[in-house]
Amino acid sequence: MVDASEGSLIKHGREILRAEGEAVLDAAEALDDAFVRAVRLLEGCTGSVVVTGIGKAGLVARKISATLASTGTPSHFLHPAEAMHGDLGVLRADDVMLAVSQSGETEEIVRLLPHVAAFRVPIIALTAHPDSSLGKAARVVVSTGQVREACGLGLAPSTSTSVMLALGDALALVTSGLRAFTSEDFARRHPGGSLGRKLAVVEDSMHPLADCRVAGPADTVREVFSRPMPRRRTGAVMVLEADDRLVGIFTDSDLARLFERRNDTALDRPIAEVMTASPVVVPVGTRLGDAVAILEARRLSELPVIDGDGRALGLVDVVDLVGLLEDAAAAARQGVRRTGHAA
């Protein structure tokens, strides 16, 4: 019978992870000039990198294609069976094919090879068998090496697919580096979700100056707060010179402290006397993720955005960034768990 105790299950899980991790490290040590030639072929592709595979290798192929596309190398997945029923029409002479098959003898892949050759599309093979049908048809073979599956039966694709996936990442990311792919390029390809917001710039999420509470240095606190609210309320008053140059900030917390201290007379004094002079600011073009890090580290609720001359352009409000702050806090907690102390 299988030992179902907690300790045995953890031990078994660790054995699988170590087996797969060691296989990836072995693949790293085995990289040779074939890897270089494959990367050069990918870098020089003026069309798309068409990635193909079936079964578990097909799932890996889809992920490799997605990684290529998201890191600056146009790519799409071609199902080898569907290719024989019309999808071959996606191939163009300026494409490169990356074919993934551990055996190199997968029936659907082998059947596809002469048709790819007819298009004069060069093939990069990701396989354990350079002498296989796929290996012989390929211009370059990146070998996954001979691995033993981590499955207890030694049958279920596990170690082999981990190595394929890691090699695919290596091909995609090294190619991305050669293409001088930048964080700006990455941001354009990831506009959605939490990642997209982190990569966005502050002007994409700030309240523009027209929607912010502003005051001149000589305005009294009472005057400022008796004015009609902007269309969308912000929690701070930016204090500006006549040319919109930012000289200070006055927050709701500052107002609350005046009341707590029963300093009512300050309400009729210039706001410049009770504002925070030279507040923390971010320049236009700052990544939203960096702004969130500043808000979190400094325990701020608002962050003015300025141009190169110090003129206010808008305000980033913590209320609009709750999700990103939660992500930052979670990452910080994860760092503490891993290191045993504050990250």
Image: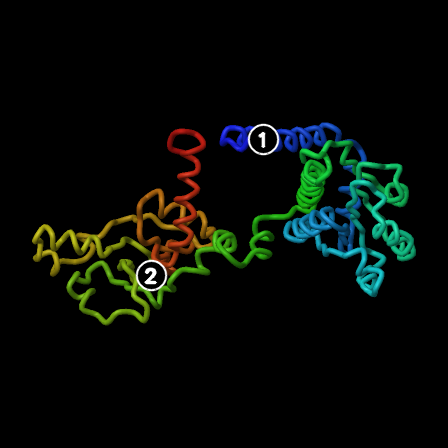
Q: Please provide percent x and percent y for residue 333.
A: 40, 39
Q: Which residue is mark 2?
A: 244
| Count of marks placed on residues | 2
When the figure is inspected, residue 239 is found, relative to residue 55, above or below; the finding is below
Q: Which residue is mark 1?
A: 12
Nearer the camera: disc 1 or disc 2: 1
| Rendered location of residue 297, percent (x, y) | 35, 42
Q: Vertical placement of 150 versus 213: above or below?
A: above
Q: Rate crowding at label 1 as few (under 14), some (14 to 19) or many (20 or more) other CA atoms within 10 Å.
A: few
Q: Is residue 258 above or below residue 153?
A: below
| Relative to 151, 270 lies left or right | left
Q: Residue 305 appears in which quarter of the rendering?
A: bottom left
Q: Residue at x 77, y 57 (%)?
A: 79
Tell me what residue is drawn at x 77 percent, y 37 percent: 35
Which quarter of the image is occupied by the N terminus? top right
Instruction: Describe residue 149's horizontal placement relative to residue 257 as left or right.
Output: right
Quarter of image, res 343: top left
Location of residue 81 in the rendering, given as x and y in whole percent from the top left corner = 81, 58
Compute the Cα span from label 1 to label 2: 64 Å
**Please, what is the three-letter code of the amino acid marked with disc 2?**
Asp
Q: Dot 1: what SS?
A: helix
Helix, strand or loop status at disc 2? loop
Look at label 1 and name its amino acid: His
The mark nearer the N terminus, 1 or 2, is 1
Q: Contact, CB < 8 Å: mark 1 with mark 2?
A: no
Question: Does residue 27 appear to the left or right of 304 in the view shown?
Answer: right
Tell me how the rendering is colored: rainbow
Residue pictured at 79% horizontal, 61% vertical: 82
In the image shown, does 16 or 190 lie closer to the viewer? Answer: 16
**Residue 40 percent location from the top left of the image:** 78, 42
